[in-house]
Image: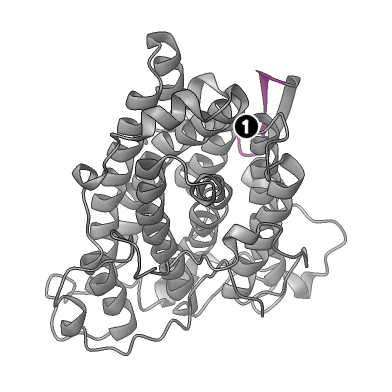
Amino acid sequence: MSNSEEFSFPKEKGEVVTYDSPVGTREIYVKSIRETFKFENVKEEDKMEGGDYYTGKPEDEKDEVILRPNPRRFVLFPIQYHEIWQFYKKAEASFWTAEEIDLSKDLIDWDTKLNADERYFISTVLAYFAASDGIVNENLLERFSSEVQIPEARCVYGFQIMIENIHSETYSLLLDTYIRDPKEKERHFDAILTMGSITAKAKWAIRWINDPDSNYAIRLVAFAAVEGIFFSGSFASIFWLKKRGLMPGLTFSNELICRDEGLHTDFACLMFSHLKHRPGRKIVEAIIVEAVDIEKEYFTDALPASLLGMNKDLMCQYIEFVADRLLVSLGNEKYYNVTNPFDFMENISLAGKTNFFEKKVSDYQIAGVMSSAKADDKDDHAFRLDEDF
């Protein structure tokens, strides 16, 4: 039984999440997976493999090399999947710990340079982040790590579990530092239960973990959406503070975590490309669009007031822009066809870019690690936030 079973709901119908927000009482409907894949007037041939509405057959996974039982899964060498191994070496080279984040200057900015609306916005973002890494790890531990049978990918997932723990520790430290009222601190740490828009995001993600019928390919797309869409707007909100020269500890940790999560999203796209039996174009699109709708509702709650250079409409457009990038990385066409509304994100990709004139940068790597990787470093599956196609 999953530890997340309290977030499950019947297969046939979804659930309405009702909550009080700064703009009044709101409702978010979180669909059941069956509702997500309910389409009108679809021809039978379009539901077959190769069709736009194909969701997979039980025997598909038995035909996937990366999922097939592998008696050599306990031995790493010789490396067979060099692209996948390269992702592991990238992650290994980028290792960091929460102790490297200096928060000594942040409280001055928090107390004297951020107004009440800005503090509400950033604290809501951190509340989601503090819980989200645990949800990602639940999926990795309960599903992906046991399903994937090739050792190179298992190395990536194992390292990801560890770095997600570091992310979770970092966000908890940030909340513990900034939120000093005990009741407010508890409310933010319990955001999955106390903040309705975050509850909806958690339910949407956890339903994929709990669903026994969703195959690996579909859940791979869903968790690419969790890390590529549910995180993207929140990352942008902290880069917005960096543009203003505020909260150096928070913004440095954001660069590190953004880089890590970009690697995880890229890896999901790479694993998707290794599948022989992929869900149809409309199925991928339905998952991504639904995630976008949930995320837009979240920012209606998190951004009730317009801030300097940041408001709900701009953020919703940015989420659509990022969703298009992810769709293209998964082999689909763009759905929204919008431009990036944030100039401060123009040169940001989830892979990170280093400014060598800064004393500390978030794109540092442990010396010598990458030189041992044998594959070419070609970001063919990179999910970027700054390039058009």
Image: 362 above or below 180: below
Question: How packed is label 1: few (under 14 Cα within 10 Å), some, or many (20 or more)?
Answer: many
Residue 370 lies left or right of residue 331; in this view the side is left
Q: Assign the C terminus to one quadrant of the image.
A: bottom right
| Observer able to see residue 3 | no
Identity of the residue drawn at 48% across and 71% down: 269
Give the structural element (helix, strand or loop) at label 1.
helix
**Left or right of 225, for residue 151:** left
Please name whichever residue, 100 or 291, is drawn nearer the observer in this view of the structure: 100
Residue 353 in picture, x, y percent from top left: 42, 69
The residue labelled by disc 1 is: 302
Q: How many marks?
A: 1
The image shows residue 272, relative to residue 107, as above or below, that is below
Q: In front: 51, or 182?
A: 182
Q: Is residue 34 magenta?
A: no
Specify the segment rendered in magenta.
10-22
The image quadrant of residue 133 is top left
- Residue 142: x, y in percent? 33, 47
Query: Vertically, is 57 above or below 38?
Result: below
Q: Nearer the viewer, residue 77 or 278?
A: 77
Q: Is residue 131 above or below residue 38?
A: above
Residue type at mark 1 is Ala
> Which x, y percent locates residue 1?
35, 35
Q: Quadrant of residue 17?
A: top right
Q: Position of residue 282 (x, y in %)?
A: 72, 66
Q: Residue at x 69, y 71 (%)?
A: 281
Residue located at (64% from left, 56% from top): 287
The structure residue drawn at horizontal position 38% and vertical position 44%, both measured from the top left corner, is 248
Residue 310 appears in the figure: yes
